[in-house]
Image (tube, rainbow, N blue to C red):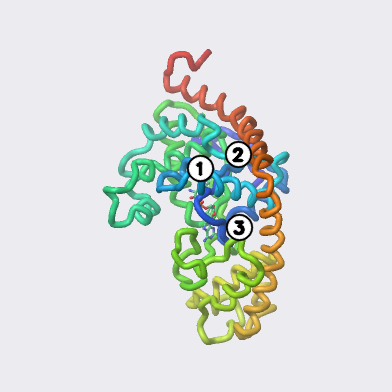
Amino acid sequence: MTEAGTGAGGAKFAPRVFSGIQPSGDLHLGNYLGALKRFAETQDAGVESIYCMVDLHAITVWQDPAELRHATRELAAGFIASGLDPDKSILFNQSQVAEHTQMAWVFNCVARMGWMKRMTQFKDKAGKNAEQASLGLFGYPALMAADILVYHATHVPVGEDQKQHLELTQEIARKFNHDYGVEFFPVTEPVIEGTATRVMNLRDGTKKMSKSDPSDMSRINLTDDADTIAKKIRKAKTDPEPLPLDADGLAERPEARNLVNIYAALADMSLDQVMAEAGGQSFSVFKPRLADLAVDRIAPISAEMGRLMEDPDEIDRTLSAGAARARAIAAPILRRTYDILGMVGAGA
Ligand code: TYM
């Protein structure tokens, strides 16, 4: 990720990472392995990194205000407990930096209805009742593009489920640059890497692990205690066969593949390394090993989150300080955008 990003016409942008997580419900193992753990690795590799609790995205569906406040602080605690250092990275909540919504309006005017209608997450979330969905849910990906492009971010680490939104972000950047004859926005690259870009539901290996699944047994939450984590892994759905001898043998076995992928990501091993070690094992042997590994990795994060949540004022101070740093980057980029658009007063 040390390469500079490339703009529409080849202009170079300094490497800058942005990513966001919604404070809507508990953080789960998919968020940790697909996002948080990788954010910490990126930060430690020395790339300038901006991470956001996207509270304005959360309210595209109903959120109880007290729960939203709690979830935003708990998410901030989750970032810090996962290794994000608020002095090295910029950590803040989206609503404190108004430039996100200001840029989102511009992108509402760049994105086309047809592009938005193709978004599978909107179709999934709105379901059969699309007429009752909020306008915000429909426009969600334009706000997401704004989150990224208001910082001229070049790379966005995410799980697999965000790929289509990031392609839309690229389309928006290209169309803006083309329409105004500028090379102003980078064509940001999604970074979807590793063995856990799509952690699956523990009860059904064909569905992704998600905060919205009604069954708590379907996911491991970062706030689960050791016994709960072990129980969820013990009860995870599997087939009756032992593990195959190599990774190819996992192709038609979604539940087995998911548990092996989780093991690999938690242990920082490749799939082949895990199969060399665990190939041929029965689940009665593999599951307790996975449970021990998961508890070993998750329990300290959970404990640290609990400790940080004892001082919510300190979390709030961290988010405010992060917001001030974020605004210092976003405000001049928004001003230049307005100037390109022809807004009077923006060029001064
Ligand atoms: P959200 O809050 O649903 O998820 C946060 C991050 O976790 C990843 N993730 C997963 N990764 C692997 N397996 C899973 N089962 C799994 N479930 C979730 C997501 O891919 C994501 O990286 N729209 C975004 C938030 C957002 C954003 C942004 C992200 C808003 N603006 C700008 C990047 C850049 C979302 O709803 O993520």
Q: Earlier in the sequence, mark 1 or mark 3?
A: 3
How many residues crowd mark 3 within 10 Å: few (<14), some (14–19), many (20+)?
many
Which residue, given by chain and number where applicable, does mark 3 sit on?
32
Residue 167: x and y, percent? 45, 47
Drawn side of residue 165 relative to residue 321, left or right: left
Position of residue 316 relative to residue 261, above or below, is above
Which residue, given by chain and number where applicable, does mark 1 sit on?
55
How many residues crowd mark 2 within 10 Å: few (<14), some (14–19), many (20+)?
many
For badge 2, the amino acid type reads Phe
Which residue, given by chain and number where applicable, does mark 2 sit on?
92
Q: Earlier in the sequence, mark 2 or mark 1?
A: 1
In this rendered view, identify the residue nearer to me: 306 or 117.
Answer: 306
Helix, strand or loop for disc 3: helix
In this rendered view, identify the residue nearer to me: 214 or 203.
Answer: 214
Helix, strand or loop for disc 2: strand
Question: Does the CB distance between marks 1 and 3 fall below 8 Å?
Answer: no
Residues at marks 2 and 1, CA–CA distance in whole angstroms: 10 Å
